[in-house]
Image: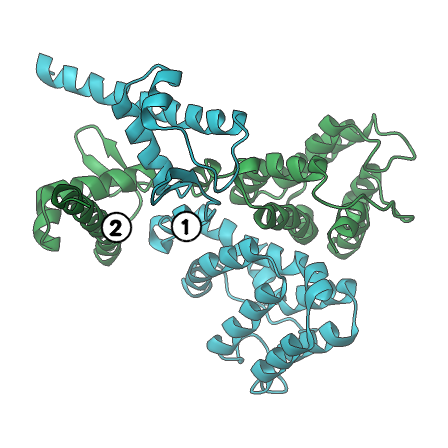
Chain colours: A green, B cyan
Amino acid sequence: MDKASFKEKLSTVDTSSLVDKVEMKLIDLFMNKGLKVGDALPKEVELAEILGVSRTVIREAMLRLRMVGLIESKKHRGAVLTNPDLLSPLKKSLHPNILAEKTLRDIFEMRLVLELGMADLLFARVTAADIEALEEIVETEPVKADSTIFNITDEIAFHGKLYEISGNQTLKDFQHMLLPVFQYVHTSGMLTEPVHSKSFISHRGLVDILKVGTPEVFRNAMRKHLDNHFSRLF
Amino acid sequence: MDKASFKEKLSTVDTSSLVDKVEMKLIDLFMNKGLKVGDALPKEVELAEILGVSRTVIREAMLRLRMVGLIESKKHRGAVLTNPDLLSPLKKSLHPNILAEKTLRDIFEMRLVLELGMADLLFARVTAADIEALEEIVETEPVKADSTIFNITDEIAFHGKLYEISGNQTLKDFQHMLLPVFQYVHTSGMLTEPVHSKSFISHRGLVDILKVGTPEVFRNAMRKHLDNHFSRLF
């Protein structure tokens, strides 16, 4: 390596790790100052002085915080703290064919875990209008439906509606993001062939339980509903 | 606004949205080329030509992909596709006091949902060594333990171990990230006071079920174990 390219390499590494550090130090600083969402941040020149680094480094670190949605610029107020969209930086990474097989399986499992675990949220928050919407979705479901017969659009609509009923926006965003990965794993041949369970519970069965049952009964029914997926995992 | 600052503003906005677009187009391009994790990417000059933009824009977009962990530079090979650490960009956003109260509650709920839903993963993957480790953790648990008596270190060790047993690294990373937020909500006074459940299941009770029970029994026991948390939500 000649001298010039060696120097270039060194300085690139150094700057990057400095900006990394300053980025984390800025977050700590805002937290220590007790700043809340919507509060204006100190000016760049002030931040540079406090942390003892150049304004260029501060600007670069602030740019990164802006990119992950932690701060934004407001007219006449400068940079303010925002409530970050937790999942938006994740979205870029969630392209099925740039994830390792193990990560894809992990995500496939996570959907099953979430749908089994959300029963209490559903029962606490479901409304009459929600039940009506679910009944409309399952209307076209064949009576002897299993997960391979119900069409994919209704399948997605049904499970998506459950996340909506949960009233948990972070959970809902998460599901929205996982959906393409789940579909990819489902159809990729990565998992072994499904075994058809004898005690399958249909979507209609789940709606009935949501109307008159308990979270416990719903969890057990959902487990049976998802049995074809589970049996492909273990 | 004077002419110069107007122009400056305009060009800033334009470049940023162009880099956004190019960033997404690059991902599409890599996917369409069927590139997999570890594959070398086309050179900047080639990418600039394909997308009809300047190398500067390509470089900026590639920098962002590097920052979210989608690509990395390898000696003698240039940029290659990597299996991104899905959650690392998220970590920066997860500082409790820069999240809105609704998001904090969402995250609190998600932990409960995950721990209720993971029973099948635990039973499929638990080993004799895992049981031993769990038994060691609950050794110090008072016999009439409820969640307010068991000390916080053992509490975290116990539940952390369950995530580890799940064998799902993404789930484990997620829990690791959620932990500080969960603790914050737990101690912040944001939720109403806990109601002590009569049918509380201890950590030791959960271990016993993991040894000889079924996922279904474990889910119901975990629901009772977490009842103090659930009763603060609804």
For residue A205, which quarter of the picture? top right
Residue B150 falls left or right of residue B52 = right
Residue B5 falls left or right of residue A197 = left
For residue B210, which quarter of the picture? bottom right
Tag 1 residue:
B88
Tell how many labels: 2
Tell me which amino acid carries mark 2.
Answer: Asp
Residue A160 sits above or below residue B111 on the image: above
Q: Residue A188's x, y, as percent?
A: 69, 36
Q: Residue A149's x, y, as percent?
A: 84, 31
Return the chain for callout 1: B
Q: Nearer the viewer, residue A190 or B44?
A: B44
Residue B150 sits above or below residue B124 on the image: below
Specify few, some or many for label 2: CA neighbours under 10 Å numbering under 14, 14-19, or 20 or more. some
Cα–Cα span, label 2 and label 1: 13 Å
Q: Residue B158's x, y, as percent?
A: 56, 73
For residue B126, which quarter of the picture? bottom right
Q: Which mark is residue A20?
A: 2
The C terminus of chain A lies in quadrant = bottom right
Considering every residue shown, the one lying at the far front of the view is: A2
> What residue is rendered at 51% in x and 43% in y?
A170
Tell me which amino acid carries mark 1.
Answer: Ser
Quick check: can you spot residue B95? yes
Specify few, some or many for label 1: CA neighbours under 10 Å numbering under 14, 14-19, or 20 or more. some
Q: Nearer the viewer, residue A18 or B185?
A: A18
> What residue is rendered at 58% in x and 40% in y?
A178
Return the chain for callout 2: A
Q: Residue A97's x, y, as percent?
A: 56, 36
